[in-house]
Amino acid sequence: MNNTVTGLARLARMTCIACLVLTATLGHAQVGLRKMVSGDMPITVMYLTAAPVQPITHGPFTIQAAKDEAPLPTPPGGRRLIVLSHGTAGSADNDHDLAATLVRAGFVVAQPLHRGDNWQDFSRAGPESWKTRPQNVSETIDAVARDPALAALVDTRRVGVHGMSAGGGTGIMMAGGQWRMLELVQHCALNLQEDIGFCLNGLGNHPFKEVLRKGQFFLSGLFLTEANAPSSMKTLQGGQSPSQSQDPRPDPRITAVSVVVPLGVIFTPESLARIAIPIALTTAGNDGVLLPRFHSDKILKYCSSCTRLSDHPIAGHFDWLSPWPAPVATTVAATQTRGGLPNPNFSAKERQKAFDQIAVFFKQKL
């Protein structure tokens, strides 16, 4: 009996020492970065390392990271993984500051470059990309799980997803949200002028395509109904249907989701109501691209496991991208019909506070 007590006391002391060493190490940790590829999909992986960061320049973006350095020792049970889904025509670079915040909180972050909807190739941006983004997320988890260096570092049994804009829509899908083209078309037929930033997204410098899209929505409003819409427009995409599974998630490894200014109007109320895992929303009152009352508010209305993590009345849609160099911001804004430029009154300090809250959410839920 005495030997058992002595052994337990020794184990407790060793555990305490290990925790103190880990805490001290985390206090001096830096953000490491490496690139990997799954098929033809690049993935940026970020993690804690003891190596000093260096400036890394990719075109107009400069980020701070220690490239290809060894990760810190793995804690018992491994680190939790968060897959970060970028917005339309996005990249890992413009979400770097949030990813680095999550890494400093102790997570490993994987950022897939979504096929057909990224800064190099946005030929399938919109509904075609929305169909494949969930598979990209699951493929990213699989790639991390089978990578010889990362498999020992990460526990992929409980994974988080974060996304902004279309990436936020991806997060809702990974939680079980289902969307269909009919939701989009009927919404834009009724609310084109109010939600023009979404309905005519990306057409700010294409006046002919803008007129054509307006005409399509007008005709849809006149003639299209639930009864006469083609079956392809009523096909549910994203989460699992009730007839297939009681669990609506397309990937049961996803256990918590965070979204910023998410795409939301495309989702069916019924599917949002079936979501059971926690979803935290960061919203922006001055978002002219995805108006909160149509997008974020719809998610909050029908999803009982969704909560508003923080709200920022003066923030716009692109204020959440960081770094976001001025030349890139100006170029992107020119493609928007409304709400393209960041708000100079929305401070980096407030954005970072919101990022910190997202990290706390994942620490609590993962």
Image (spheres, helix red, strand yellow):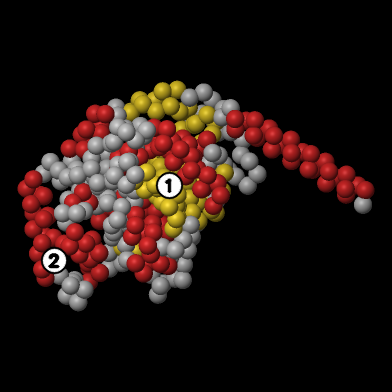
Which residue was labeled with disc 1? Answer: 310
Mark 2 residue element: helix
At 39% across and 59% down in the image, what residue appears? 300
Can residue 112 be seen in this snapshot? Answer: no
For residue 151, what is the image quadrant? top right
Specify the quadrant of the image occupied by residue 16: top right
Graded by Cα atoms within 10 Å as few (under 14), some (14 to 19) or many (20 or more), the crowding at tag 2 reads some
* Closest to the observer, 324 or 31: 324
Seen at 52% across and 35% down, the residue is 104
Residue 310 x/y as whole percent: 43, 47
Q: Distance between the residues labelled 1 and 2?
A: 35 Å
Q: Is residue 35 above or below residue 123?
A: above
Does residue 331 lie above or below 265 as drawn?
above
Circle 1 SS class: strand
The kind of residue on which mark 2 rests is Gly
Horizontal and vertical percent position of residue 359: 50, 43
- Does the rendering let one see residue 24? yes
Q: Residue at position x 21%, y 73% from top?
A: 226
**Are the residues tagged 1 and 2 within 8 Å (C-beta)?**
no
Mark 1 vs mark 2: in front: 1
Q: Mark 2 points at which residue?
A: 221
Is 340 on the left or on the right of 4, as rendered?
left
Q: Height in image: 142 above or below 21?
A: below
Q: Which residue is drawn at 41% across and 36% down?
A: 350
The amino acid type of the residue labelled 1 equals: Ser
